[in-house]
Image (cartoon, rainbow, N blue to C red):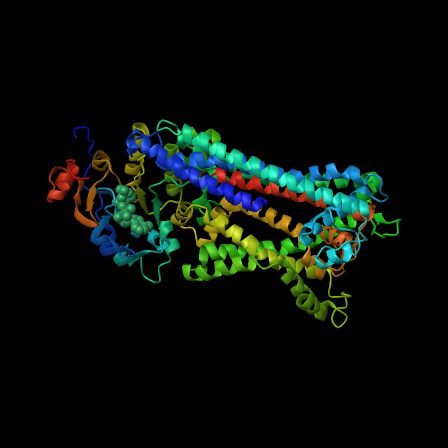
C-alpha cells in the first residue's frame, strides 16, 4: 500500500476513534455533561490524537529513511563496478523506478533494449543498463516492496492498537481536555521546530560551504582584495570590496530617495489626509509594495536608464556612458522602497496616541509643530527600525541591480558608472554549469554568508529599536 | 458637608468671559450636548458637575475647539470669547487654544523630559528670550502645580516615567506655563492624594486673581470648596447653573437635588 493511501487509512481510523471515544464517554455518564470532566468532543479528540501522533510519526520517519537504508543494502552489489559509486547508485535507483513503471517481472527482464524502453516510460538514462545495475535495481524493487508491506502492517497495527487502548482509557473522569491541550501545544512546538530547523539547516549549509571556500582561497584576499576578476580557467581574483562598495553605494542612493519621500507621504497620510483619501491611498501604496522587483528592474532598464541618458548622456551633459549605472539602480530601488517605508512609518505614526497630539494642540501648537515636536520624536525609534528594515531590503535586492546597474565590479565614486553588488555576483557565479569544487563557484557561498551576516545585524538592530519603542506606551 | 471651606462667593468683577448660546454637539448620530447656554464669568472659578457621560468633557472641549480634532463631532450654536465668536471663520483655533488652555481628563505628558514638557508651550509661543527666562518659567509653573519638590532633581528624566498623580500635576504645570486667559481643567485632581489636591485647589484659587478657570469634577466637596459658580449637567442638558452656594444649599431642580445628595449618579 502506498504511503498516501496509508495516510488516508490512518485518518479514517482516527475519525472512527473520535466517534468511539466520544460516544463511550457519553454513554458512561448517560449523557449528563455535569459528571464528565471534559466536553464529549475532547474525549473524541483524545482518541484521535492517540492514533494520529504515533502512526503519522512512524509513517514520516520511515518514508524519509527507507530510501537510504535500501540504498545501503543494495550498494554491495555494485562494489565491483568501475565508475563513481554514488553516480552508479543513482542509476540503480532510476532503473528501479523505471522497472516499476514498466510493470514487468524483474526476474525475467533482460538488459537488451531496456534503456530505450525506459526512456519511453519517461526515465532517461545516461548510459546503457549493465547487468549488475539491472540486478541491483531488481533487488532494490524487491526490498522496496518488502519495506512497503512492513510499513503498512506496522502503521496499521499501531493505529488500531492505539485506538483500542485510548478508547478503553476513556472514562468520564479522564482529563481529556488537558490531554488535548497538551497535544495542541506539541503540535505548535513541532511547527516551530520545523521552521527553526530549516533556518539552521540553511545557515549550516552556508557555513560549511564558506569554510570549504576559505580552504582553497585565502580569506584575507577575499575580504581585503580590491579586484573582482573571476575566471573559470583559474587565476581569478575574488576580492569582495568592489562588491561591498557597489552594494553600499546603490543602497545609500536608494535610501536617500526612499526615506524622505516615504516618510513625508506617511506623515501626509496619517496626519493630513482625509479618511476618504486614506481609504484609497493606503491600499494603493500596499499594492505598490507588492510589485515584484523584476518589474522595477524592467522599469530601470527600459525607462529610467534611457531617460537619465537623455540628460546625463552624450547628448546632454556627457557624464554617462550607458543607461545601466549606479544612479539608475539606486533611483529605481528607492522608488521600490518608498511604499515599504511609508507603509511601515504610517503604522508607527498612527500608533502614537491621539492624547499626545491633543496635548500639544491644546497648548496652542499648530499641526506641523505638533508633528515635528511631538509625533515624530515619539515615533522616531520605530521609524528608525523601518529605515533599517528598508536598508536590509536594499542590500538584498538583486533584479534591479542586474538590470539597472550593469555587471562591472568597480571601486569608483562616480554614480554614473556601471557597478554591481554582492547579490548580483552571487547569481552570476552560480548560473550555467558549475563545478561546485572550484573557488569561482564556492565564492558565492562566502558572498552569501557575508550578506547574511550584514542583513542579520541590521535586522537585529532594527527589531531591538522597534521593541524599545513599544515599551514606551504599554 | 461640614468640612466645606467656602471661599468668598461674591465675584470681585462680574464680567462675562465666555458666553455660550444654544450649543449642541453631535457625535455622528449621537446627540451628546443639547441646547446648552451658559455665561462663564471672568476671574471666577466655574465648576461643571454631573454624572459620568453627561457631556461635561464634551462641553469643555467646545470652549477651545478641541472638538475639531474629533472627526465625528459636530458643534452648532454660538460660543463667544470676549464677545468674539470662536467658531467664526476668521478665528484661528491655534491662537484660540493659546488663550484657552486645557488640562485633559487623562494625563498625557509628551515622551520628553519633565523640563521639556513644561517648556513646550513657552517655546512655541516665544514667551522666553533666554534660557534663564525659560528656566524661571518652568520652575514657577512646576512650583505652582506642586510638583517642584518631587521633580527638581529629575528635570531631565522622562515625563512619562512619573506616577499617575505626578503626571497630572505635570500636565497642569504645562498648561499654566503658557499663561492662558482661560484654563479648562478636566478632573485635574482625580488621581491626587488629599495634600496634592489641596495644593491644586489653592492654585486654582490663586489663578482666579488673573484668569477664569473652568473645572470639571466629580467631587461635590471640591466644587463647593473652589468654585463660585456651578453648572449641573445631566444627560446632555444643562440642568441648573448659578452661584455655587445656591446650587448646593438651595437647588431649584429636583435632579440637581438628588445628584448632590447622592441619589443619582
Ligand atoms: N469621541 C467621541 N466619539 C463618540 N462619542 C463620544 C466621544 N466622546 C464622548 N462621546 C459621548 O458623548 C457623551 C458625553 O461624553 P463626555 O466625555 O462629555 O462625558 P463626561 O461628562 O465628561 O463623562 P465623565 O465624567 O465620565 O468624564 C457620552 O455619551 C460619550 O459616549
Ligand atoms: Mg469627562
Q: Is residue A56 left or right of residue A71?
A: left
Say if A20 sits above or below B31 in the image: above
How many numbered marks appear?
0
Quadrant location of the C terminus of chain A in the rendered image: top left
**Position in image of residue A4 (x %, y %):** 56, 46
The one of A313 and B2 positioned closer to us in this rendering: A313
The one of A221 and A433 positioned closer to us in this rendering: A433
Q: Is residue B10 left or right of residue A15?
A: left
**Position in image of residue A134 (x %, y %):** 77, 47
Query: Who's the residue at 81% across and 53% down the image?
Result: A128
Which quadrant of the view contains residue A262?
Answer: bottom right
Quadrant location of the N terminus of chain A in the rendered image: top right
**Position in image of residue A233 (x %, y %):** 88, 52
Residue at the front extreme, as displayed: A108
Q: Is residue A162 left or right of residue A461?
A: left
Q: Is residue A351 left or right of residue B184?
A: right
Query: Who's the residue at 65% across and 52% down the image?
Result: A394
Say if A286 sits above or below A169 in the image: below
Q: Is residue A188 visible?
A: yes
The one of B48 and B115 positioned closer to us in this rendering: B48
Query: Who's the residue at 14% across and 42% down the image?
Result: B256
Q: Is residue B192 visible?
A: no
**Position in image of residue A54 (x %, y %):** 53, 34
Query: Who's the residue at 38% across and 50% down the image?
Result: B98
Amino acid at each position: 500500500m502506498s504511503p498516501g493511501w496509508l495516510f488516508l487509512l490512518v485518518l479514517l481510523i482516527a475519525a472512527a476513534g473520535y466517534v468511539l471515544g466520544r460516544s463511550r464517554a457519553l454513554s458512561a455518564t448517560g449523557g449528563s455533561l455535569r459528571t464528565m470532566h471534559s466536553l464529549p468532543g475532547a474525549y473524541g479528540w483524545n482518541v484521535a490524537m492517540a492514533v494520529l501522533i504515533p502512526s503519522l510519526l512512524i509513517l514520516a520517519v520511515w518514508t524519509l529513511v527507507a530510501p537510504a537504508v535500501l540504498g545501503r543494502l543494495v550498494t554491495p552489489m555494485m562494489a565491483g563496478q568501475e565508475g563513481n559509486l554514488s553516480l552508479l547508485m543513482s542509476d540503480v535507483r532510476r532503473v528501479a523506478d523505471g522497472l516499476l513503471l514498466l510493470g514487468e517481472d524483474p526476474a525475467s527482464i533482460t538488459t537488451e533494449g531496456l534503456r530505450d524502453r525506459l526512456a519511453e516510460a519517461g526515465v532517461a538514462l545516461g548510459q546503457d543498463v549493465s547487468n549488475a545495475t539491472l540486478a541491483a535495481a531488481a533487488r532494490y524493487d524487491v526490498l522496496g516492496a518488502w519495506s512497503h508491506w512492513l510499513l503498512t502492517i506496522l502503521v496499521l497495527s499501531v493505529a488500531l492498537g492505539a485506538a483500542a487502548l485510548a478508547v478503553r482509557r476513556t472514562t468520564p473522569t479522564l482529563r481529556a481536555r488537558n490531554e488535548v491541550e497538551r497535544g495542541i501545544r506539541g503540535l505548535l512546538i513541532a511547527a516551530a521546530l520545523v521552521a527553526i530547523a530549516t533556518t539552521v539547516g540553511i545557515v549550516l549549509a552556508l557555513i560549511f560551504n564558506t569554510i570549504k571556500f576559505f580552504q582553497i582561497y585565502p580569506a584575507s584576499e577575499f575580504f581585503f582584495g580590491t579586484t573582482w576578476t573571476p575566471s573559470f580557467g583559474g587565476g581569478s581574483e575574488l576580492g569582495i570590496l568592489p562588491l561591498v562598495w557597489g552594494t553600499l553605494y546603490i543602497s545609500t542612493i536608494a535610501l536617500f530617495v526612499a526615506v524622505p519621500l516615504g516618510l513625508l507621504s506617511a506623515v501626509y497620510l496619517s496626519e493630513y489626509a482625509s479618511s476618504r483619501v486614506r481609504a484609497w491611498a493606503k491600499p494603493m501604496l500596499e499594492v505598490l509594495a507588492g510589485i515584484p522587483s523584476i518589474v522595477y528592474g524592467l522599469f530601470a532598464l527600459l525607462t529610467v536608464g534611457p531617460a537619465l541618458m537623455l540628460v546625463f548622456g552624450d547628448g546632454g551633459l556627457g557624464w554617462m556612458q550607458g543607461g545601466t549605472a549606479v544612479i539608475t539602480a539606486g533611483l529605481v530601488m528607492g522608488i521600490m522602497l518608498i511604499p515599504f517605508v511609508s507603509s511601515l512609518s504610517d503604522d508607527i505614526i498612527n500608533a502614537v496616541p491621539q492624547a499626545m497630539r491633543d496635548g500639544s494642540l491644546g497648548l496652542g501648537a499648530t499641526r506641523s509643530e505638533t508633528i515635528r515636536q511631538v509625533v515624530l520624536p515619539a515615533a522616531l525609534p520605530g521609524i528608525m527600525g523601518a529605515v533599517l528594515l528598508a536598508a536590509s531590503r536594499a542590500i538584498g535586492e538583486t533584479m534591479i541591480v542586474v538590470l539597472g546597474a550593469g555587471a562591472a565590479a568597480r571601486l569608483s565614486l562616480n554614480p554614473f558608472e556601471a557597478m554591481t553588488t554582492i547579490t548580483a555576483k552571487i547569481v552570476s557565479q552560480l548560473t550555467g554549469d558549475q563545478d561546485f569544487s572550484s573557488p569561482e563557484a564556492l565564492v558565492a557561498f562566502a558572498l552569501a554568508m557575508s550578506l547574511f551576516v550584514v542583513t542579520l545585524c541590521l535586522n537585529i538592530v532594527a527589531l531591538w529599536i522597534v521593541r524599545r519603542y513599544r515599551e514606551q506606551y504599554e | 458637608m461640614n468640612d466645606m471651606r467656602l471661599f468668598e462667593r461674591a465675584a470681585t468683577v462680574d464680567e462675562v468671559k465666555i458666553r455660550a448660546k444654544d450649543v449642541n454637539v453631535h457625535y455622528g448620530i449621537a446627540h451628546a450636548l443639547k441646547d446648552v447656554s451658559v455665561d462663564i464669568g471672568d476671574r471666577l472659578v466655574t465648576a461643571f458637575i454631573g454624572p459620568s457621560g453627561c457631556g461635561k468633557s464634551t462641553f469643555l472641549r467646545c470652549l477651545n475647539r478641541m472638538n475639531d480634532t474629533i472627526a465625528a463631532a459636530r458643534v452648532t450654536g454660538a460660543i463667544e470669547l470676549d464677545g468674539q465668536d470662536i467658531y467664526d471663520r476668521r478665528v484661528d483655533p491655534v491662537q484660540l487654544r493659546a488663550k484657552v488652555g486645557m488640562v485633559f481628563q487623562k494625563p498625557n505628558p509628551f515622551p520628553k523630559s519633565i523640563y521639556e514638557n513644561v517648556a513646550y508651550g513657552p517655546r512655541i509661543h516665544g514667551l522666553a528670550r533666554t534660557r534663564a527666562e525659560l528656566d524661571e518659567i518652568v520652575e514657577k509653573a512646576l512650583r505652582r502645580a506642586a510638583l517642584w519638590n518631587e521633580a527638581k532633581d529629575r528635570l531631565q528624566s522622562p515625563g512619562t516615567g512619573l506616577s499617575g498623580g505626578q503626571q497630572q500635576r505635570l500636565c497642569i504645570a504645562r498648561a499654566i506655563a503658557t499663561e492662558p486667559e482661560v484654563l479648562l481643567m478636566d478632573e485635574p485632581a482625580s488621581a491626587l492624594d488629599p495634600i496634592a489636591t489641596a495644593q491644586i485647589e489653592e492654585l486654582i484659587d490663586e489663578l482666579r486673581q488673573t484668569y477664569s478657570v473652568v473645572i470639571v469634577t466629580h467631587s461635590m466637596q471640591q466644587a463647593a470648596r473652589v468654585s463660585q459658580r456651578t453648572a449641573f449637567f445631566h444627560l446632555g442638558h444643562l440642568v441648573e447653573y448659578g452661584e455655587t452656594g445656591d446650587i448646593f444649599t438651595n437647588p431649584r431642580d429636583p435632579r440637581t437635588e438628588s445628584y448632590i445628595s447622592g441619589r443619582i449618579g
